[in-house]
Image (spheres, helix red, strand yellow):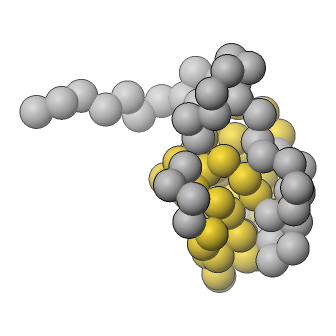
Amino acid sequence: MSYTKLQAGRAAAVTPSDTVNIPAVTGGTNNGCVLYVGGAGTLKVTTIGGDDVTFSGLIAGSFIPVHVVKVWATGTSATNIIALW
């Protein structure tokens, strides 16, 4: 059985954008991050696999356990989004 690290070592606020990806934490290749959503709403993201997905009906305090490279401004109403690496 492999061990999966469950704690984040880095965190940063995310500004949703239709054109800009979330920067890589080290400045190199963006391997994605998981998200914390502080304010309820809808969240449109692009995964590291290139899938555009919309999560609807999120409640405040939700974690999104998907490796994400972009949070879209269009289609996102959730607020206080934090990237966790």
**Residue most extreme to the bottom:** 57
Query: Which quadrant does the N terminus fall into?
Result: top left
Q: Is residue 41 above or below residue 27?
A: below
In the picture, measured across the screen, residue 76 lies left or right of residue 31, that is: right
Foreground residue among 8 and 24: 24
Residue 27's quadrant in the figure? top right
- What percent of the width, then of the height, locates residue 75? 81, 77
Q: Is residue 53 above or below residue 6?
A: below
Please name the residue shown 81% across and 71% down the image: 76
Please name the residue shown 41% across and 34% down the image: 6
**Residue most extreme to the left:** 1
Q: Is residue 30 above or below residue 67?
A: above
Residue 52's quadrant in the figure? bottom right
Foreground residue among 81 and 25: 25
Please name the residue shown 64% across and 81% down the image: 56
Total labels: the figure holds 0
- Residue 58: in sight, yes or no? no
Q: Is residue 58 above or below residue 64?
A: below
- Residue 60: in sight, yes or no? yes
Residue 2's quadrant in the figure? top left
Query: Which quadrant does the C terminus fall into?
Result: top right
Please name the residue shown 87% across and 73% down the image: 74
- What percent of the width, then of the height, locates residue 13? 82, 40
